[in-house]
Image: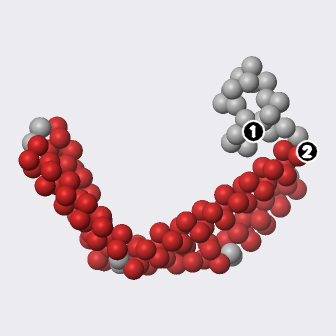
Amino acid sequence: MDHPVLKQARKCAEQIAKCEEIIRFRAAEEQVNQSDSVQQLIVQIKKKQKELVHAKHYHKHEHLKQIEQNLVDMNERLDGLPIVMEYQQSQVAANDLIQMIQQIIGDTVSQKIEVEVGNPVESGCGSGGSCGCS
């Protein structure tokens, strides 16, 4: 049995997937995933991170400082790439849209019935759960 609300939720999800913010994010994500230079830099960063863990474990303090600086430099280089900046900006925009939709749904539902939407419900849910009521 497919509940009518679930059918509407699927339709809403399809509409969200067609939003400019989501399309832009998916395109930017695809570009980042297809970029050899970005992927090579990510691999290098992961190797340096492993090196950092090793240096910390064996208390190689001088080497640790050098690795940390290398990681800072590599991350700055990655974050400074136009393709990565576009990806990060589109990710923020897509996330903002999704959070706004969640907030609207939560607010709309909580006007009809008391539900926990991430913050404690003023009168409490009575379960003693994450909202802190007893």
* Residue at 88%, 56% in the rendered image: 4
> Which residue does the image show at 8% across and 47% down from the upper left?
62
Q: Which residue is mark 1?
A: 116
Q: Is residue 26 left or right of residue 96?
A: left
Kindly indicate the quadrant of the structure image that contains residue 5: bottom right
Residue at x 68% of width, y 42% of height: 118
Percent of width and height locating residue 133? 73, 24
Q: Is residue 74 left or right of residue 101?
A: left
Q: Which residue is mark 2?
A: 112
Determine if residue 8 is in view. Answer: yes
Q: Indicate the quadrant where residue 43 lies.
A: bottom left
Residue 29 in sight: no
Q: What secondary structure is found at the residue carrying circle 1?
A: loop
Q: What is the C-alpha distance between the residues marked 2 and 1?
A: 12 Å
* Residue, far right: 112
* Amino acid tagged 2: Lys
Q: Could you say which disc has been placed on residue 34 in the image?
A: none
Picture layout, residue 8 above or below residue 116: below
